[in-house]
Image: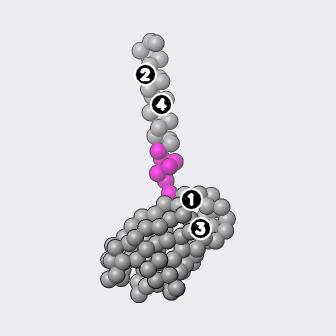
Amino acid sequence: MKKSMKSAVVYVAALSACLLFSTLAHAEDYVLTLKNNQFSPKVLTVPAGQKIKITIKNQDATPAEFESSDLNREKVVAPNSEIVVFVGPLNPGSYGFFDDFHRDTTTGVIVAK
């Protein structure tokens, strides 16, 4: 293969990788806060059809566990720290979540529109 052809192939491959990475890396950013064993906001409205990034900030002195059977996610949040969870793209609808350590009182819902 000629040198100029090899350069073109390498350039196209690199450009394709950059475009793919930027598409995968781009996600809408949202924040859920845990304080006094309550999520805020309790209803998080997000656009349907887009990947979203949710930062979960635990402002309590006890651990929490962000869990959602609807989203197939389960992640512990240490006291006074935060985690990041990626979900989607989501179909229009409602997706429940809860703190598994306080399941009866600490709940919320993501609504994709």
Question: How many residues crowd around disc 4 within 10 Å: few (fewer than 14), some, or many (20 or more)?
Answer: few
Question: How many residues crowd around disc 2 within 10 Å: few (fewer than 14), some, or many (20 or more)?
Answer: few
* Residue 32 point in image, percent of width and height: 46, 74
Rendered residue at 50%/41% (across/down): 19
* Secondary structure found at label 3: loop
Q: Above or below — where is 33 with respect to 18?
A: below
Q: For residue 70, which numbered disc appears in the image?
A: 3
* Secondary structure found at label 4: helix
Mark 3 or 4: the one toward you = 3
Mark 3 or 1: the one toward you = 3
At label 3, the amino acid type is Asp
Which residue is more in the foreground, 41 or 58?
58
Q: Are marks 3 and 2 in contact (CB under 8 Å)?
A: no
Q: Are marks 2 and 4 in contact (CB under 8 Å)?
A: no
Distance from disc 3 to disc 1, alpha carbons, whole Å, reads 11 Å
* Residue 36 point in image, percent of width and height: 41, 87
Which badge, 2 or 4, is on the more N-terminal residue? 2
Please state if 59 lies on the left or on the right of 4 as rendered.
left
Q: For residue 102, which numbered disc appears in the image?
A: none
Please state if 61 lies on the left or on the right of 70 as rendered.
left
At label 4, the amino acid type is Ala
Read off the residue under disc 4. Answer: 13
Which badge, 3 or 2, is on the more N-terminal residue? 2
Distance from disc 2 to disc 4, alpha carbons, whole Å, reads 10 Å
Q: Which region is colored magenta? A: 21-27
Q: For residue 88, which numbered disc appears in the image?
A: 1
The answer to if 12 sits in the magenta stretch is: no
Distance from disc 1 to disc 2, alpha carbons, whole Å, reads 36 Å
